[in-house]
Image: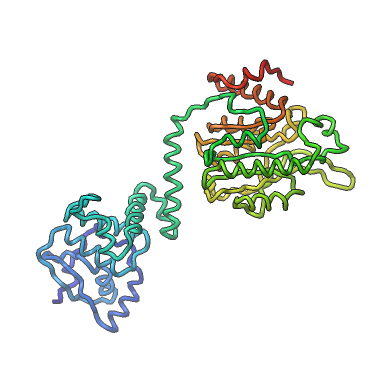
């Protein structure tokens, strides 16, 4: 039957938010007529067909064909609206997820909730079958619809997949934030081991580590004829380059083994070793971008002459075992951090903790385990503890190992927390050099 359009009452609480191209529908109705009547209840409240009604209004029509259902509960009216719109497949992703969630809730209210393994009532599988989707899709969409209420900013994502991925990251970070208040920093000198990393790494369990940050001793022979050769000679560099490369390769394989899936490794190297390092990492199984990250050191460079510019940068690869998103998106891969003054260094390749903290905070969460198999000055361990991570390191040189113990002692005093019994006693009374 036909009724006057001004008789149709529209409640403010309607599910559809985006009515799409009403003008195009109006042209179709003008050309072919209304193919499907709108649905109203006994009081002429609109149940389904608001877009068709708006098209009639746009055409200036006074009447519209209706189908009147006189005996409906509020849930049944909502059910009709939802199912009609779902079958039309013209929701945006935000509306679609909300619709799936609401139709699932409506059906459960009408028929009771089914319990997995016990039958009876309405389940997500029933919802999936009723709308022609998989159970997994319905389960994810229902959760995503709830997430839109908790995190309204997800509405801005262009696709459902993008929103879901962002939600997963946001959820993980909110859990981390919740747990972070419970994480206590423990300075334990047993976190640093005095020994050969090729052997000590084998003692770590498979997939037990969350982040590797390391600067292997690639600088063999590069100091010849320079002041640093006298200052650091015999303390860092091995005289046999092939032995060093073999050691680095063996330790890097161990790093891959002990890293959990979807975790990162920051691997520092001299730019002249680019091809060797890239091939080694990819052959072991890491995902590595071809463009390295760059530490741009403030101040003067090293090794400059009238024929060459001084070097004032270092590079590293961000290598991934699987995939893990960075904590902050969109940051650049050139990092401006001041170098450590030579008179304050305890190791020739010592890096500022501010640089290391930057990487640790981008690639791990509070409470996770960060390791450095070539600990050197111990800066990775200090930066890890400062950012409330668990840490482990290995250092072959006894003098540098002792300096790390001193640094841990100082950090303990600065944080005013107990120093646990560890390897300091085994090392003896360490004095700063």
Residue 402 in the image: state x and y as whole percent: 68, 23
In this picture, residue 112 sits left or right of residue 24 = left
Residue extending farthest bottom? 31
Residue 53 in the image: state x and y as whole percent: 24, 71
Which image quadrant for residue 21? bottom left
In this picture, residue 2 sits left or right of residue 356 = left
Q: Nearer the viewer, residue 420 or 44?
A: 420
Q: Image quadrant for the C terminus?
A: top right
- Residue at x 44% of width, y 46% of height: 170
In this picture, residue 311 sits left or right of residue 281 = right
- Residue at x 18% of width, y 53% of height: 120
Q: Nearer the viewer, residue 21 or 325?
A: 325
Q: Say if 137 sits above or below 228 in the image.
A: below
Residue 7 in the image: state x and y as whole percent: 16, 68
Residue extending farthest top? 429
Q: Image quadrant for the N terminus?
A: bottom left
- Residue at x 74% of width, y 27% of height: 344
In this picture, residue 343 sits left or right of residue 47 = right
Residue 192 in view (yes/no): yes
Colour mode of the rendering: rainbow
Q: Nearer the viewer, residue 158 or 206?
A: 206
């Amino acid at each position: 039957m036909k009724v006057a359009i001004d008789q149709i009452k529209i409640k403010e609480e309607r599910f559809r938010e985006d009515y799409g191209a009403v003008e195009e529908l109006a042209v179709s109705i003008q050309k072919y007529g209304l193919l499907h009547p709108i649905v109203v209840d006994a009081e002429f409240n609109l149940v389904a067909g608001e877009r068709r009604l708006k098209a009639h209004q746009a055409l200036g029509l006074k009447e519209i064909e209706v189908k009147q259902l006189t005996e409906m509960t509020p849930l049944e009216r909502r059910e009709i609206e939802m199912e009609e719109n779902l079958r039309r497949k013209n929701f945006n992703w935000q509306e679609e997820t909300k619709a799936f969630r609401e139709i699932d809730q409506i059906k459960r209210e009408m028929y009771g909730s089914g319990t997995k393994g016990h039958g009876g009532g309405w389940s997500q599988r029933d919802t999936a079958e009723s709308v022609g989707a998989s159970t997994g899709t319905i389960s994810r969409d229902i959760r995503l619809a709830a997430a839109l209420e908790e995190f309204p900013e997800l509405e801005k994502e262009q696709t459902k997949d993008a929103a879901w991925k962002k939600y997963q990251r946001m959820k993980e970070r909110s859990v981390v934030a919740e747990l972070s208040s419970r994480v206590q920093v423990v300075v334990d000198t047993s976190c640093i081991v005095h020994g050969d990393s090729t052997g000590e790494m084998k003692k770590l369990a498979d997939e037990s580590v969350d982040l590797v940050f390391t600067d292997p001793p690639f600088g063999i022979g590069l100091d010849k004829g320079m002041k640093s050769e006298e200052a650091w000679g015999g303390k860092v560099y091995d005289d046999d380059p092939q032995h060093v490369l073999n050691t680095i390769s063996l330790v890097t394989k161990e790093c891959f083994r002990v890293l959990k899936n979807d975790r990162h490794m920051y691997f520092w190297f001299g730019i002249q070793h680019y091809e060797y390092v890239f091939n080694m990492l990819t052959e072991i199984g890491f995902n590595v971008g071809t463009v390295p990250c760059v530490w741009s050191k403030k101040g003067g460079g090293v090794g400059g002459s009238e024929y060459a510019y001084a070097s004032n940068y270092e590079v590293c690869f961000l290598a991934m075992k699987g995939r893990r998103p960075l904590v902050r998106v969109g940051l650049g891969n050139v990092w401006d951090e001041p170098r450590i003054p030579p008179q304050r260094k305890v190791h020739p390749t010592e890096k500022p903790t501010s640089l290391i903290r930057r990487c640790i905070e981008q690639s791990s969460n509070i409470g996770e385990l960060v390791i450095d198999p070539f600990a050197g000055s111990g800066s990775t361990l200090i930066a890890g503890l400062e950012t409330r991570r668990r840490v482990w390191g290995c250092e072959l040189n006894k003098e540098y190992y002792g300096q790390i113990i001193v640094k841990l002692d100082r950090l303990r005093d600065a944080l005013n927390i107990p120093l646990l019994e560890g390897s300091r006693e085994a090392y003896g009374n360490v004095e700063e050099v």
